[in-house]
């Protein structure tokens, strides 16, 4: 692993070189969870850290110490950052195995972060690691930037009777945390509007919409898996694929029931569910029922690039989550050239262009949404020419998701904050 860069530098944050260009920056990124645990947040954090390094910036990643020595990678391009490991523990259920949380105690990692003298402190969580980022930012007089990755209120079902008071407390806490930042990055348009509305008339931080980017070239180069051969499905099969964490908040049960409705109308349809999570056991029991037996397969948890290779072998991508800030998997699927059928939700229409590279389903209530999703799957499965047009449009315009562009937007925000132009 890379060693920690030399600590303190004497130059001013606003110094520019003789060409007028901003110099490389020193960025300390603080995260609540990290690899080898795989999630949208860890994928986004690695993409930012390595993307900044590829652009010539110095990065210190302050993260919970992993249980093992092999972090692996989610497939992001760029150099491995330097690390400062926080004391950590395995989070209790419902957190999955491998999900490490930082312990809020003084540590060598925090000393290293202060000595690193960052130009910018960038938090990926508002909680333990976010508070650490805020203290380091105050100590070094660096602007604090926060990327809001998660709609925390959508996870209240894990708290049972505590859900309502916890949601109220979390909302007040988040407003306070946002207000102490120089800038808040929202991966989606709807989330940015929600943050601005909830901050109200108080002096506001900069709220900037910057979705997480994907490595377009790497996804394009992935060899698609022949799913018909892999799962013994007929040659005329039309394969719908979904990918992600299998959990209640992702509406995965609604998606499977919608597919069952669609499959009753088109015997060629098959479903591949890529991923794992707390709902996996119940889903395996459901797809073993007579109406879906042999017509749906679950892979369990896979490395990210292996999961994307499987998804790339499908004919269309289905998505039912309405709890996203962005829906990173939508950008990945479109880059892989998959037309999408998705329920309308936060972040969806930032990625999917209805009628161009996918179909976005609106409705009220799970019954209407499930029926609409099923009808759209049947419609797209039955129209090969339309699927091919949408797939071509998705692949052709995938550069709009490119991680280099997105990291450049983050760096532009940093420099605006450092020069007082934001």
Image (spheres, rainbow, N blue to C red):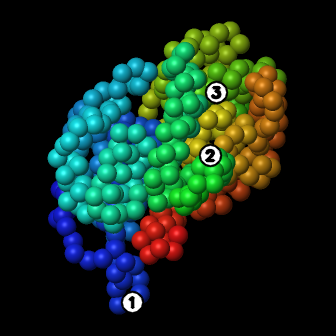
| Label drawn at residue 381 | none
Disc 3 is placed on an element classified as loop
Earlier in the chain: of badge 1 and badge 2, it is: 1
**Alpha-carbon distance for marks 1 and 2?**
42 Å
Name the front one of labels 1 and 3. 1
Mark 1 or 3 closer to N-term?
1
Furthest residue toward top:
290
Q: Nearer the viewer, residue 8 or 312?
A: 8
| Residue at image coords 21%, 71% | 9
Disc number lying in front (1 or 2): 2
Q: Residue at x 56, y 57 (%)?
A: 204
**Front-most of residues 301 and 264:** 301
Q: Position of residue 330 (x, y in %)?
A: 61, 45
Q: Which residue is mark 3?
A: 251
Characterize the local packing of mark 1: few (<14), some (14-19) or many (20 or more) Cα atoms within 10 angstroms: few
Q: Give x and y (percent) for residue 56.
A: 34, 70
For the residues labelled 1 and 2, say whether their Cβ atoms are less than 8 Å apart: no
Residue at 35% from the left image edge and 90% from the top image edge? 18
Which residue is under mark 2?
Answer: 198
Above or below: residue 257 compared with residue 139: above
Residue under label 1: 19
Q: Residue 29 in the image: x percent, y percent?
A: 35, 53
Image x and y of residue 389, in percent: 76, 53
300 vs 56, left or right, is right
Precedes in sequence: disc 3 or disc 2: 2
**Which residue is at the far front?**
202
Please, is residue 82 above or below residue 289 in the view?
below
Q: Nearer the viewer, residue 284 or 124?
A: 124
Kindly state the secondary structure of the residue where label 1 is placed: loop
Q: CA distance from mark 1 to mark 3?
A: 52 Å
């Amino acid at each position: 692993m890379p060693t920690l860069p030399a600590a303190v530098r004497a130059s001013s944050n606003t110094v520019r070189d003789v060409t007028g260009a901003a110099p490389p920056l020193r960025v300390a990124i603080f995260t609540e969870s990290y690899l080898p645990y795989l999630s949208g947040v860890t994928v986004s954090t690695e993409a930012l850290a390595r993307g900044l390094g590829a652009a010539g910036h110095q990065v210190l990643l302050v993260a919970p110490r992993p249980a093992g020595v092999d972090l692996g990678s989610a497939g992001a391009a760029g150099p491995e950052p330097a690390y400062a490991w926080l004391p950590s523990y395995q989070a209790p259920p419902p957190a999955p195995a491998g999900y490490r949380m930082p312990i809020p105690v003084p540590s060598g990692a925090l000393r290293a972060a202060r000595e690193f003298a960052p130009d910018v402190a960038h938090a990926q969580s508002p909680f333990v690691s976010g508070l650490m980022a805020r203290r380091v930012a105050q100590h070094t007089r660096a602007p604090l930037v926060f990327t809001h990755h998660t709609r925390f209120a959508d996870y209240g079902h894990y708290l049972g009777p505590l859900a309502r008071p916890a949601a109220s407390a979390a909302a007040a806490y988040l407003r306070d945390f946002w207000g102490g930042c120089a800038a808040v990055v929202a991966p989606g348009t709807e989330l940015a509007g929600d943050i601005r509305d909830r901050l109200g008339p108080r002096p506001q931080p900069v709220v900037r919409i910057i979705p997480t980017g994907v490595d377009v070239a790497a996804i394009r180069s992935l060899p698609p898996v022949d799913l018909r051969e892999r799962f013994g499905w007929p040659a005329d099969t039309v394969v719908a694929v979904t990918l992600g964490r299998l959990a209640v908040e992702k509406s995965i049960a609604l998606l499977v029931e919608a597919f069952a409705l669609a499959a009753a109308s088109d015997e060629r349809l098959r479903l591949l569910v890529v991923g794992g999570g707390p709902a996996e056991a119940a889903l395996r029991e459901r797809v073993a029922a007579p109406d879906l037996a042999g017509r749906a397969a679950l892979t369990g948890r896979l490395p990210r690039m292996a999961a994307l290779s499987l998804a790339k072998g499908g004919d269309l991508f289905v998505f039912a989550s309405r709890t996203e800030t962005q829906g990173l998997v939508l950008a990945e699927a479109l880059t892989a050239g998959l037309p999408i059928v998705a329920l309308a939700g936060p972040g969806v229409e930032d990625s999917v262009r209805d009628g161009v590279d996918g179909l976005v389903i609106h409705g009220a209530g799970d019954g209407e949404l499930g029926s609409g999703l099923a009808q759209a799957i049947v419609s797209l499965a039955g129209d090969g020419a339309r699927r091919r047009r949408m797939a071509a449009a998705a692949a052709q315009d995938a550069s709009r998701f490119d991680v280099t562009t997105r990291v450049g937007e983050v760096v532009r925000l940093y420099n605006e904050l450092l020069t007082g132009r934001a």
